Amino acid sequence: MEVIVETRSTQLLKGTLDMCLLATIAQRPCYGYEMVQRLTQQGLALVSEGSIYPLLSRLQQRGYIEGYLVPSTDGPPRKYYRLQPEGTKQLEQWQAEWETFAQAVEQILKGERFDADPRSVHAISDLRPH
Amino acid sequence: MPILDQYTQYQISDLIEACASYWELRGVAPGSRNEMRLELEQHVTQAVRDGKSLEAVIGPNPPAFAEAWAREMRPRIFRGGIVVLPALVYALSVVSTTALIQQLLAHSPSFTFTLFTAYLLISSGLLALLIPLSGFLAPRIRTRQGRVTLLCALVVLVVLALREAGMRVNWSMALLNWSWPLTLVLFALAAFLYSLEYWRTANRERTSSAGRVPLVRSVMAFVGSVAVFDVMLFVGSVAVFNVCTLAGKLL
């Protein structure tokens, strides 16, 4: 059962990781490892941390974020990411989509809409084999 | 900050090298490749210092990770296509220099390109590609010696498998035979293709943030690598010959 739960949360995270990364960068500019740490602190543990990099590249290619090198005192320069105006718009759109989606799932899980429409219950009972 | 032991440092550098080589094969621009390499190296080093494994960073399948990242960089070249011209330049340079050396040293008017030379050239090229990519095994095989041993064991296994399969091949069979003027033509063709490759690389680097390599340094590096390749080809031919003889005696 533990494995099933882990797989589901992994799948959910895969579908929303780009949005989470964009939201993390929107808070303040940060580098890859820092993003992973911040996601972990929020309770989102990644199966493979490196999976953020293809997504960061995609967000950068689409113009939502911008990468820039910052000189480091203890080694080579570090690549930070900051939000771009296009990214702000996209994040707002994704947030709205997520709220609608999460609300719908929550209602289905709680059975709210199911109970509110008696015709639906009747239709399902008709489908049962006689 | 904990200091990493030598094995772990080799593990990290081999893995990063494998990813960088793969991105080069996939045609990712040098500037982007350098940034990707830098980011990954810093992430892996910090993660390992925090007590995490390499697998925790790049997942259970390192080539899949490298491919996923390369795909997002929108390379304009088909998979492996970037090596076609450099491989042709290397092959022509090695063959023409080998022919030239033989014709000069043996005072022979012609050079015979045998099946054995072709086999050695192809297998050396494949090995030159596989050795940097062997770093993908770093998360599973911790030591560098272990990874090199596995590659050597694979080569020997292929030879033994071919022998076991009963392949009776006439290795000294002549595929091509040419006189020294053609050797000079091949030499000139190799030089022309090399300048074409240099121009192409310089153009790509001009559009990226990476610095351009000076022509003299590039030519010196190339001539050096061809000389090393020639020596390796000679040593390799002796080694393969001995391995085949030994395998024949054992079987």
Image: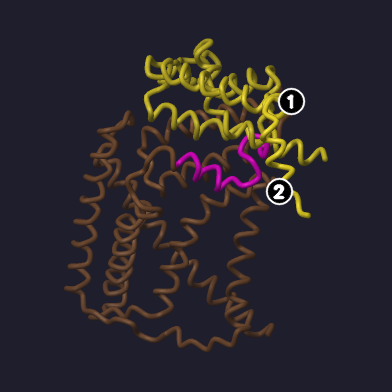
Chain colours: A yellow, B brown
Chain where mark 1 sits: A
Quarter occupied by the C terminus of chain B: bottom right
| Up-down relation of residue A2 to residue B164 (above or below) | above
Does the magenta run of residues contain A81?
no
Quarter occupied by the N terminus of chain B: top right
> Of all residues shown, which one is farthest toward the right?
A1
| Up-down relation of residue B152 to residue B36 (above or below) | below
Mark 1 Cα-neighbour bin, 10 Å: few <14, some 14–19, many ≥20:
few
**Mark 2: which amino acid?**
Leu
Residue depicted at 40% across the width and 80% down the height: B115
Q: Position of residue B166 (x, y in %)?
A: 59, 88
Q: Report which residue position mark 2 lands on.
A: A127
Q: Which residues are magenta?
A: B54-70
**Counting residues from the N terminus, which is met first, the one under dot 2 or under dot 1?**
1
The kind of secondary structure the magenta stretch mainly shows is helix
Q: CA distance from mark 2 to mark 1?
A: 22 Å
Q: Report which residue position mark 1 lands on.
A: A110
| Up-down relation of residue B22 to residue A76 (above or below) | below
Of residues B249 and B203, which is closer to you in this image? B203
- Figure quadrant of residue B125: bottom left
Chain where mark 2 sits: A
Assess whether mark 1 and mark 2 are in contact (beta carbons under 8 angstroms). no
Find numbered disc 2 in the image and state the secondary structure of the residue it sits on: loop
